[in-house]
Amino acid sequence: MYATALVALVVIAVAAIAAPMVLMRTPYATNQGRPIVQPVAFDHRHHVRDDGIDCLYCHPDAEREASAGIPTTELCMGCHGQVWPDSPQLAMVRASWETGTAIGWNRVNDVPDHVYFHHGVHVRNGVGCVNCHGKVEDMARVARFAPLTMGWCLDCHRHPPDRPDYGRKVTALTTCSACHR
């Protein structure tokens, strides 16, 4: 009787510890594959695939900064001041331009605050945007492509894919202090 209760208590304790750890790695918790609704219906398919705009044109900080950054309204209006200048779909962009108020874009990819990630280091070492962000040229609304969990990052650092878009191999930085700062 006591042995059964003790075993049940141990199973409950292990499940209470393991369940959140398993849950945090599921697509439900990581938002993987879930399109993010943005304040302006920005279609990457049109801009990237149809118009051939490179990722780094809108996200130039990705080559040198920790964050890739969000395009400024000024950048958007560089084209849309002439292309579709009166479109109702761009009303919020025009309002942002006129008032100088930034558009409140919703973040798609994010790592926890205790994790250090630097876009520039990855881009300069040949890691293509598609490896972490997926084929945004095929996304009407961008969704998180990769889980961005510690295990996913470590797998890539330990066994980088041998793909032409990678350029040089990823350095096997797998020490805790490389990312946890």
Image (cartoon, grey):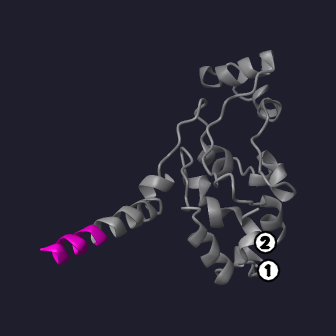
- Labelled disc at residue 126: 2
Circles 1 and 2: CB distance less than 8 Å?
Answer: yes
The furthest residue to the front = 2
Question: What amino acid type should be assigned to the residue bearing mark 2?
Answer: Gly
The residue lying at 57 percent from left, 72 percent from top is 151
Q: Quadrant of the N terminus?
A: bottom left
Residue 71 seen in this snapshot: yes
- Figure label count: 2
Residue 171 within the magenta-colored segment of the rendering: no
The residue lying at 78 percent from left, 30 percent from top is 73
Q: Which residues are magenta?
A: 1-10
Q: Note whether 73 is above or below 123 in the view shown.
A: above
Q: Which residue is more in the foreground, 64 or 129?
A: 64
Dividing the picture into quadrants, the one containing residue 130 is bottom right
Question: What amino acid type should be assigned to the residue bearing mark 1?
Answer: Arg
Q: Which residue is more in the foreground, 44 or 127?
A: 127
The furthest residue to the left = 1
Q: Which residue is more in the foreground, 118 or 126?
A: 118
Q: Which residue is more in the foreground, 96 or 9?
A: 9
Q: Residues within 10 Å of mark 2 (few under 14, many from 20)?
A: some
Q: Residues within 10 Å of mark 1 (few under 14, many from 20)?
A: some
Q: Secondary structure at mark 1?
A: loop
The residue lying at 58 percent from left, 33 percent from top is 41
Decide if residue 151 is on the left or right side of residue 60. left
CA gap between label 1 and label 2 equals 6 Å
The residue lying at 71 percent from left, 73 percent from top is 176
Decide if residue 105 is on the left or right side of residue 69. left
Q: Residue 53 at what x, y percent from top left? A: 74, 49
Residue denoted by label 1: 168
